[in-house]
Image: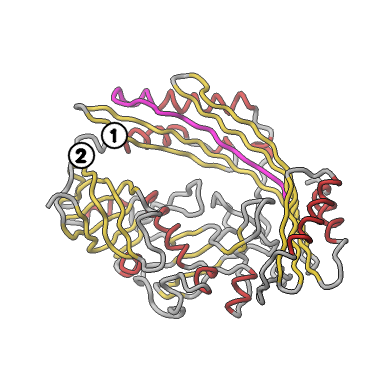
Amino acid sequence: MSPELLDIADRVVAQTQPGEQLEAYVARGSSTEVRVYAGEVEHFVSAASEGVGIRVIRDGRTGFAHAGTLDPAAVAEVLAEARENVTYGTPDEWAGLAEPDGVEPIEQRLWSDELASFATTAKVDLALELERLTVALDERIRVDDANYVDGGGEAAIVTSTGVRRHGRSNACHLSVSTLADGDGETQTGFGFSVGAHPGEFDLERAAREAVERATRLLGARKPPSGRTAVIFDPFVTAQMLGVIGSTLNGEAVVKGRSIFADRLGESIAADGVTLVDDPTDRRAYTATDTDGEGLAARRNVLINAGRLERFVHSSYSGRRAGLPSTGNGVRGGYAGSPGAGCLALRLLPGARSQADLIAGIDHGVLVLSVSGLHSGVNAISGDVSVGASGIVIRDGALAEPIREFTLATTVQRLLSEVVEVGADEEWLPMRATGVSVLVDGVTISGTS
């Protein structure tokens, strides 16, 4: 790592005036996006960015400014603008910067030299190879697009309250979107592979999953309405965890916008549900050693054997709740201020495979995809109503595919009616891992 970014942040914070708190967040990064179609590169972007964001807090008022350059004159202008913006801020008794809490970051290997030096032509070749492998698996398959994506960066954060951190990380993933044609209909699918560097990719598995997800839904029809057991596919579970995580956000809690705001210490889920937020696990795509405020990232158990043990807090939400930060300050980069949020959610896996879960069900549904998740979930009431597609489970085996039905339940019921968590954990390019989950008694609305 270069000391340049840390030096810039140090110089900014050295200008702190009496009566104010000052934070400098300085970052530099790069990314590559490759999209191929029909053996040709359809889209290619290689981008680099750098910039600084500065927060100033005085008398409970916060001012923020940023710029997409590290030119010394621009940095000075950003500091002046942040100070000016303080005068327009609304007083907030809880406003303040994070302070060192004595927790040291867990050392992780977040940077891959192999990825950093990976040739651009090789990135394109990977996307082309994934497309070729996918098309070759089934004559009914068309590839909508195949993609290679990577990103990496370095950041430094220094505050007048004593926080001083500097780190870097990078990551990459491949994905492919498919179309399966049959008997006048078309179904869609996808597959992906993640890794610390391209050498960890499994192209054949990504291609196979993309083909299976599309072809297994050919011939799908609307199911009859009713109440049935449901198994959520790992990717669907990961999406659901994102919604559940938002209800455990300390910022939502202190604002009275969480269904679990007054239930700390109570049982809110089945005994088999243990949910952790663990950005210290390197297998997580969003693994990190520090949060967006420069505090050490840490493993937080949110639900332990069904009992709600903790909400995730930034320093601000923690201050409002009378609690310390849990190391969950989240920020999108130098252009934004931090808020509270989950960093890397994981539902601890059980002992049985998805196939074993299916074998024990007389009648149910394997849910392979959901749509309208964020618009169909009310994080305040917990109501869930989302579109879905999947496969009927009959007598312990997969039967006919179904589509265009609605799952109707609540977040509270989903958690409390979990029968079993599977063992088929998948590490995905998102803020949550996936695993199969068997839930009893979910209402599906299809044909009357």
Residue 56 horizontal side relative to residue 340, left or right: right
Q: Secondary structure at mark 1?
A: strand
Quadrant of residue 308 within the rendered picture: bottom left
Q: Residue furthest top?
A: 39
Above-or-below relation of 143 to 79: above
Q: Secondary structure at mark 2?
A: loop
Return the disc, 2 or 1, that comes first in the chain's sequence. Answer: 1
Residue depicted at x 73% and y 70%: 100
Residue 221 on image: x %, y %: 18, 41
The three-letter code of the residue at mark 1 reads: Gln
- Residue 420's disc is none
Q: What whole-number distance in Å separates the C-alpha atoms at marks 2 and 1? A: 9 Å
Q: Residue furthest left?
A: 448
Instruction: Categorize mark 2 by other alpha carbons within 10 Å: few (<14), some (14-19), many (20+).
Output: some
Q: Which residue is mark 1?
A: 187
Q: Does residue 112 belong to the magenta stretch?
A: no
Please give the count of numbered marks on the rendered protein: 2
In the image, which residues are magenta? 135-155
Residue 68 horizontal side relative to residue 370, left or right: right
- Residue 220's disc is 2
**Front residue of this view, candidates 4 and 446:** 446
**Front residue of this view, candidates 400 and 329:** 329
Callout 2 touching callout 1 (CB < 8 Å): yes
Residue 245 on image: x %, y %: 47, 62
Q: Residue furthest front?
A: 88
Residue 317 on image: x %, y %: 59, 71
The three-letter code of the residue at mark 2 reads: Ala
Above-or-below relation of 229 to 178: below
